[in-house]
Image (cartoon, rainbow, N blue to C red):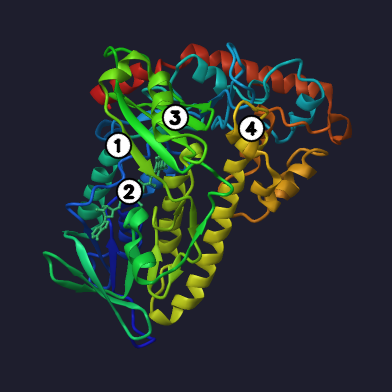
């Protein structure tokens, strides 16, 4: 391929959430239907199913959906959507006993740290009050089963920040419609059976079983864990991180509600188990429940048994599905003229709903930095690869944090998670520093961390991380200011608890009246 070739055609292989997010972002930025635009084609196998899980998101999803022109009402109606205001962690800190305290992380209403940071004050004198309830009011809203907004609130705006729970299959269908109808993305249903390369290793074309051979200037690999282009053809190595994050399988079930008016939690519930944890997500019509576990610490049968025990009698009539997860990321995400996006690029267990977050961010970055000619590819690819590696490393640190500061010692899984050899140096350094001072903005200077100061504050202090309060500077703030802040949080809590509707009630209204 000549080096100065203008990039006029892009082919995305794979039609899971990652493929369709990429198609939307590229479609929006590259105007495929205009004469000067870049033609975007998505090839999707009619035979290979998508992974079909991925029900939790983070608040950034609101920005993306809005930017892609999708109406929130339509999204809620079509994708079995409910609201998510945070994650409630149960039994993560101590061995399970009745009435163990739980903590919320992260409530999407971020901690109050400007102009007065309550963290040093809380460290010094919290009188048994949880961190989250000291610095934010959304935990109480979750406890009360309330929605984050009113029926009169404008689309994508709430009384506080929120994200969604969704049905991944239905979400792909909505993204498909949007990409094809709004942005003119070409959709082909076929299996890619062969990949042809130029002499320099670039991909020249893909051969399909029912649409012949299709060539393009740039290819996006969204083929899921199978990584057909970046792995099978270009042989970019996968950096395995299962020595840090041990969970490598999930057993999943879909649980119907027992009655039409059963309450729906407006947060994800994550309950720690002896060899992993269980997610519990309420959609409109059913719950998605899954046990993420380490197959080196338990058997598949035991893992399924733990899930069925969690669900209770109802589980007797429900089938399950086991998913093997590749934990880690590619050595490069952009190699030659191929970009890996989605599970082909990397994955870590879904504890903080990082999948869609990272893939959406990658698709956006690719669309915004899209090269005009092949000459630019090496320059853009270098930066892209650096940024993506940093992102994955930071995500891994953050997920590991939940395990390595736990005090559980009731199984080998929890003990192994505290072995220093399994904790990345970067996280060890931070944890050592945070024994003497709480995290601050100076810990998060790269501007490209997926999880930031607020996220760390919630997890660290939700899990009672022992920062020595006697050494913390800056806690001598005006008592009056603290009093004022407490009053502000208390007032907001009271107002929210009075005004906000029950979660299911709001969802039903949106479905009926929009
Ligand atoms: P897939 O869904 O696997 O799609 C692959 C696509 O490639 C399919 O369309 C397939 O047909 C196509 N394909 C494959 N081979 C070929 C071929 N030869 N020719 C043509 N097409 C081909 N993310 C979150 O954000 N939140 C969560 O709560 C969450 N939970 C998860 C739980 C588990 C257990 C797992 C495993 C993942 C979870 N994720 C979550 C991640 C989320 O599921 C994925 O990020 C998301 O679905 C993207 O998947 P994908 O599109 O990369 O791959």
Mark 2 lies within 8 Å of ligand 1 (Cβ measured): yes
Label located before the other in sequence (4 or 3): 3
Label located before the other in sequence (4 or 2): 2
Question: In the rendered structure, are the residues bearing label 1 and label 2 in contact, judged by CB atoms less than 8 Å apart?
Answer: no
Would residue 113 be found to the left or right of residue 166 on screen?
right
Place residue 452 in its image quadrant: top right
Q: Badge 2, how many Cα within 10 Å: few under 14, some, many 20+?
A: many
Residue receiving disc 1? 75
In front: label 1 or label 3: 3
Label located before the other in sequence (1 or 3): 1
On residue 279, the disc is 3
**Residue nearest the observer in this picture, 11 or 321:** 321
The residue that appears at 51% across and 13% down in the rendered structure is 497
Label located before the other in sequence (2 or 3): 2
Place residue 41 in its image quadrant: bottom left
Work out how far the residue at label 4 is from the one at label 1, CA to CA, in angstroms: 29 Å
Residue receiving disc 4? 458
- Local secondary structure at mark 1: helix
The residue at the far left in this view is: 210
Where is residue 465 drawn, in percent x and y?
A: 73, 31
Where is residue 15 drawn, in percent x and y?
A: 26, 53
Rendered view: 317 above or below 61 = above
Work out how far the residue at label 4 is from the one at label 2, CA to CA, in angstroms: 29 Å
Label located before the other in sequence (1 or 2): 2
Where is residue 121 drawn, in percent x and y?
A: 79, 26
Q: Badge 3, how many Cα within 10 Å: few under 14, some, many 20+?
A: many
Residue receiving disc 2? 17
Work out how far the residue at label 1 is from the one at label 3, CA to CA, in angstroms: 23 Å
Work out how far the residue at label 2 is from the one at label 3, CA to CA, in angstroms: 20 Å
Mark 3 lies within 8 Å of ligand 1 (Cβ measured): yes
In front: label 4 or label 1: 4
């Amino acid at each position: 391929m000549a080096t100065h070739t203008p990039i006029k055609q892009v082919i995305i292989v794979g039609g899971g959430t990652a493929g369709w997010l990429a198609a939307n972002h590229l479609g929006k930025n590259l105007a495929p239907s205009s004469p000067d635009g870049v033609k975007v084609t998505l090839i999707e196998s009619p035979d290979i199913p998508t992974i079909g899980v991925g029900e939790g998101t983070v608040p950034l999803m609101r920005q993306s959906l809005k930017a892609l022109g999708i109406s929130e009402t339509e999204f809620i109606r079509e994708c079995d959507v409910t609201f998510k205001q945070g994650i409630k962690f149960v039994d993560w800190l101590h061995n399970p006993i009745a009435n163990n305290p739980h903590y919320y992380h992260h409530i999407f209403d971020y901690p109050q740290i400007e102009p007065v940071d309550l963290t040093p004050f809380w460290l010094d004198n919290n009188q048994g009050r949880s961190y989250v309830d000291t610095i934010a009011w959304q935990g109480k809203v979750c406890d009360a089963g309330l929605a984050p907004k009113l029926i009169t609130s404008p689309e994508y705006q709430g009384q506080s920040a929120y994200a969604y729970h969704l049905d991944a299959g239905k979400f792909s269908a909505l993204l498909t419609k949007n990409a094809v109808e709004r942005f003119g993305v070409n959709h082909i249903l076929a299996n890619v059976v062969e990949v042809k390369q130029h002499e320099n290793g670039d991909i020249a074309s893909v051969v399909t079983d029912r649409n012949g051979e299709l060539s393009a200037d740039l290819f996006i690999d969204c083929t899921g864990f199978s990584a057909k282009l970046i792995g099978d053809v270009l042989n970019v190595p996968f950096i395995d991180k299962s020595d840090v994050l041990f969970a490598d399988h999930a057993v999943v079930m879909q649980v119907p509600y027992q009655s039409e008016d059963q309450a729906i939690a407006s947060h994800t519930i994550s309950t720690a188990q002896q060899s992993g944890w269980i997610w519990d997500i309420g959609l409109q019509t059913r719950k998605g429940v899954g046990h993420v576990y380490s197959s080196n610490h338990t058997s598949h049968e035991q893992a399924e048994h733990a899930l069925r025990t969690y669900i209770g009698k109802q589980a007797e009539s429900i089938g399950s599905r086991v998913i093997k997860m590749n934990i880690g990321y590619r050595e490069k995400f952009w190699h030659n003229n191929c970009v890996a996006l989605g599970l082909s690029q990397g994955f870590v267990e879904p504890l903080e709903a990082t999948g869609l977050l990272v893939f959406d961010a990658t698709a956006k970055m690719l669309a915004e930095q899209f090269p005009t000619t092949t000459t630019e590819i090496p320059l853009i690819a270098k930066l892209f690869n650096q940024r993506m590696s940093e992102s994955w490393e930071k995500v891994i640190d953050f997920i590991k944090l939940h395990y390595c500061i736990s005090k559980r010692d009731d199984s080998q899984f929890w003990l192994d998670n505290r072995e220093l050899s399994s904790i990345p140096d970067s996280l060890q350094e931070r944890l050592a520093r945070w024994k003497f001072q709480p995290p601050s903005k100076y810990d998060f200077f790269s501007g490209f961390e997926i999880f930031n100061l607020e996220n760390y504050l919630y997890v660290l202090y939700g899990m009672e991380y022992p920062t020595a309060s006697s050494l913390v500077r800056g806690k001598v703030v005006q008592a009056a200011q603290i009093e004022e802040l407490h009053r502000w949080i208390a007032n907001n809590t009271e107002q929210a608890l009075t005004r906000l509707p029950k979660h299911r009630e709001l969802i039903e209204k949106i479905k009926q009246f929009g």
